[in-house]
Image: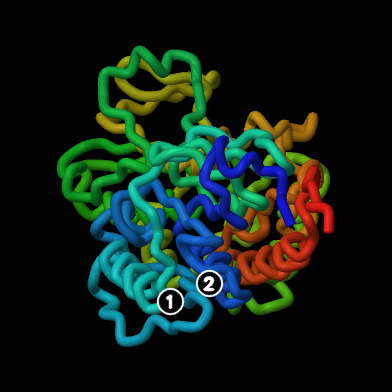
């Protein structure tokens, strides 16, 4: 049988390309390799990071493994015996590296994917810094770390102090003796604030909405309900919100202590930024040296633009993990599968779906005469 792919003249022919080697990408690669795809021959895994660890390798040093919320093991290999006082970037980076080696996943890195477009013979042309690939299917597992979200406020360009985002947070030591404003009501914002408060001259916390602190255990039913809210947005073709954004903030002992000290006394969102700080329309002002934007991330999917997968609402409509507009494309670690346990399940689901797709001749295939 000939597949009509022009013999790979438009790119090296492979069955599946996985873009991204974080939790979701490694899960998908594991399940695809277990289904019979041979890494580096039928299955190619690309990652633009310099080393193993996904987005974890870029986390700030003070985020130790013991502070990580809900890290779920990759399929087929548990993470055991980790020192809770070691930086999470080291612990999880080492775990991912061992995982890739144990299962022979042969991740190509650092490799940048610049675009995915329609190829020939029913294949997808994946354009990369190491050359093009002609894939029958694609698993996109690029996550969000490369697209930090910076809100825009009047006067932002006039601020004379320092502005930075969670993506560049260096740990609390750099803020010793400074007045620091943390923007954002998620887990990262509260973690930054509690660390910085121990060394800063003063801290302030602003959020768009009143923070919701969650008492008691977060069980399976609560998790399903939270994921369902994110899934609904994805089904409607809207940009996904993170699972964390709908679960609330866990009320740990550290959070209780910070609230008692007044560290987590929240202010409403300011209206504008001044050269020396921020201001509200009611006349209130706060002077600060640093504005730290803990305002989250957006899905890094710009390289998929040539395929025209976005809906009018701005997101990619997904059923399970499959893009509704192109069944050859699966998105894992996107929307409801952005959590570590969700990423594992999505990787398994994508591999199962792709096994069925690969069992069929590709669209546009030409069958040789007997």
- Which numbered disc, 1 or 2, marks the residue that appears first in the sequence? 2
> In terms of secondary structure, where does tag 2 sit?
helix
The quarter of the picture where the N terminus appears is bottom right
Alpha-carbon neighbours of circle 2 within 10 Å: few (<14), some, or many (≥20)? many
Q: Quadrant of residue 358?
A: bottom right
The foreground one among 319 and 279 is 319
Residue at (54, 21) in percent of width and height: 282
Indicate left or right for 164 with 23 as reference. Answer: left
Alpha-carbon neighbours of circle 1 within 10 Å: few (<14), some, or many (≥20)? some
On the question of residue 143 being in view, the answer is no
Residue at (75, 48) in percent of width and height: 323
Indicate left or right for 81 with 296 as reference. Answer: left
> In terms of secondary structure, where does tag 1 sit?
loop
Residue on which disc 2 sits: 30
Q: Quadrant of residue 90?
A: bottom left
Indicate left or right for 352 with 279 as reference. Answer: right
Q: Position of residue 180 (x, y in %)?
A: 30, 38
Q: Position of residue 6 (x, y in %)?
A: 64, 39
Residue at (57, 65) in percent of width and height: 28
- Asked if labels 2 and 1 touch by Cβ distance under 8 angstroms, the answer is yes
Residue on which disc 1 sits: 103
Vertical side of 213 occupied by 125: above or below: above
Q: Position of residue 33 (x, y in %)?
A: 55, 72
The foreground one among 116 and 245 is 116
Q: Position of residue 370 (x, y in %)?
A: 83, 59
């Amino acid at each position: 049988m000939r597949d009509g792919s022009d013999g790979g003249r438009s790119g090296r022919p492979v069955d599946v390309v996985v873009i991204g080697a974080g939790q979701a990408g490694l899960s998908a690669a594991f399940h695809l390799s277990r289904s019979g795809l041979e890494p580096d021959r039928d299955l190619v895994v690309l990652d633009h990071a310099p080393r193993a660890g996904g987005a974890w390798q870029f986390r700030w040093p003070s985020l130790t493994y013991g502070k990580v919320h809900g890290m779920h093991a990759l399929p087929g290999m548990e993470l055991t015996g980790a020192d809770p006082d070691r930086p999470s970037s080291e612990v999880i980076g080492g775990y991912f590296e061992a995982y890739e080696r144990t299962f022979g996943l042969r991740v190509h890195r650092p490799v940048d994917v610049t675009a995915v477009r329609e190829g020939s013979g029913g294949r997808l042309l994946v354009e990369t810094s190491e050359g093009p690939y002609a894939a029958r299917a694609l698993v996109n597992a690029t996550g969000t770390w490369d697209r930090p979200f910076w809100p825009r406020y009047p006067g932002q360009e006039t601020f004379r102090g320092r502005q930075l985002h969670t993506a560049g947070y260096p740990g609390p030591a750099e803020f010793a003796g400074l007045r620091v404003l943390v923007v954002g009501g998620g887990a990262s914002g509260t973690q930054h604030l509690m660390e910085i408060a121990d060394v800063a001259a003063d801290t302030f916390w602003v959020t768009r909405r009143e923070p919701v602190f969650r008492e008691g255990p977060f069980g399976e039913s609560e998790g399903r309900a939270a994921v369902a809210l994110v899934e609904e947005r994805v089904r409607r073709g809207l940009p996904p919100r993170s699972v964390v954004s709908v679960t609330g903030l866990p009320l740990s002992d550290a959070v209780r202590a910070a609230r008692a000290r007044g560290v987590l006394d929240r202010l409403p969102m300011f209206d504008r930024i001044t050269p020396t700080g921020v201001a509200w329309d009611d006349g209130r002002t706060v002077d600060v040296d640093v504005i730290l934007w803990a305002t989250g991330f957006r899905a890094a999917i710009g390289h998929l633009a040539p395929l025209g997968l976005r809906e009018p609402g701005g997101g990619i409509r997904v059923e399970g993990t499959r893009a509704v507009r192109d069944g050859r494309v699966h998105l894992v670690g996107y929307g409801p599968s952005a959590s570590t346990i969700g990423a594992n399940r999505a990787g398994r689901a994508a591999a199962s779906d792709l096994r069925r797709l690969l069992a069929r001749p590709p669209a546009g295939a030409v069958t040789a005469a007997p």
